Amino acid sequence: MTAPIKIYGPSFSTFVRSVMMACELKGLAYEVTTEVNGEEVGFHTAGHKAIHPFTKFPVLLTDQGPIAETVAILHYLENAYGGTPLYPTDAFAQAQVEQWSGISGIYVDFKIVRKVLLEFIFPQGEDGSVRMDKVEAALPGVEHGLAVVADQLAEQPYLCGNEITAADLILIPIIDYIEKAEVGNPRVAKHANLLAYIEKIRAEAFAKDILG
Ligand SMILES: N[C@@H](CCC(=O)N[C@@H](CS)C(=O)NCC(=O)O)C(=O)O
């Protein structure tokens, strides 16, 4: 039996979840771990820096060495294991997947995860309070990010057409978290297609145990 693929990082991380879903879609056994070479490696320690120079996660731990950065990991899984494709072969279509992976993993992530969700998870205010002024100031950015991806999904079921791709895997955990966080103030639900997208995906076999 081949050893499971090792994903270093916490399973609550959006990007770790992207890699977990890729493994699920490709039918690959995997484990999410905080061990490297059999040793416990704490986040933001020297051991973590040795596998990611900016101490981020996920990092894929392969027999050939660590692979940092979600996009690089998703490409590696595609090239090394095959299975359900996450990238089209046509050059333009592939560039579209790269484009929407970047838009989702850089801009949408920044506006939604970094500026708002992390403020609730790791409050930076006095006595550990959430800085609501910062959250309020960031909400137009959340709405902008949601509108951009909702527009892209207006005429097609996935970000880059009729098939799920790596770009969706990067977007999905972000939309899942923000939609769940918005009880009583539905910004995702303002876009019926975006709500339908995340609800459909949450029920699918590759995602349901990961998104919970
Ligand atoms: N560009 C990186 C971003 C990774 C990233 O920011 N991961 C977050 C978790 S979702 C992280 O490592 N946070 C811990 C930190 O910033 O110290 C990627 O695509 O993998």
Image (tube, helix red, strand yellow):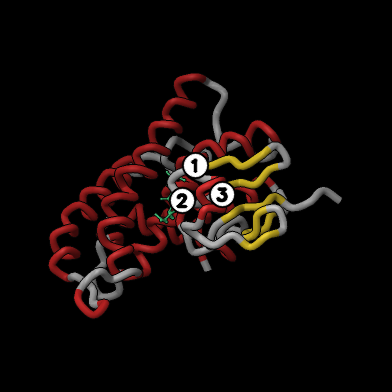
Residue type of the residue flagged with mark 3: Val
| Pointer 1 with pointer 2, Cβ within 8 A | yes
Residue beneath the point at 70% across and 37% down: 64
Q: Is mark 3 on a helix, strand or loop?
A: helix
Residue beneath the point at 36% across and 59% down: 195
Question: Which tag, 1 or 2, sits closer to the chain's start?
Answer: 2
Q: Mark 2 points at which residue?
A: 56
User: What percent of the width, then of the height, locates residue 197?
Assistant: 42, 54
Q: Distance between the residues labelled 1 and 2?
A: 8 Å
Q: Nearer the viewer, mark 3 or mark 1?
A: 1
Instruction: Say if 42 sits above or below 96 in the image.
Output: below
Q: Mark 1 points at which residue?
A: 69
Q: Find out if the beta carbon at label 1 lies less than 8 Å from the nearest ligand 1 atom.
A: yes
Residue type of the residue flagged with mark 2: Lys
Q: Name the residue under label 3.
A: 19
Q: Find out if the beta carbon at label 2 lies less than 8 Å from the nearest ligand 1 atom.
A: yes
Residue beneath the point at 82% across and 48% down: 2
Question: Which tag, 3 or 1, sits closer to the chain's start?
Answer: 3
Residue type of the residue flagged with mark 1: Glu
Q: Can residue 200 be seen in this view?
A: no
Q: How crowded is mark 2: few (under 14 residues within 10 Å), some or many (20 or more)?
A: some
Q: How crowded is mark 1: few (under 14 residues within 10 Å), some or many (20 or more)?
A: some
User: What percent of the width, then of the height, locates residue 59?
Assistant: 56, 48
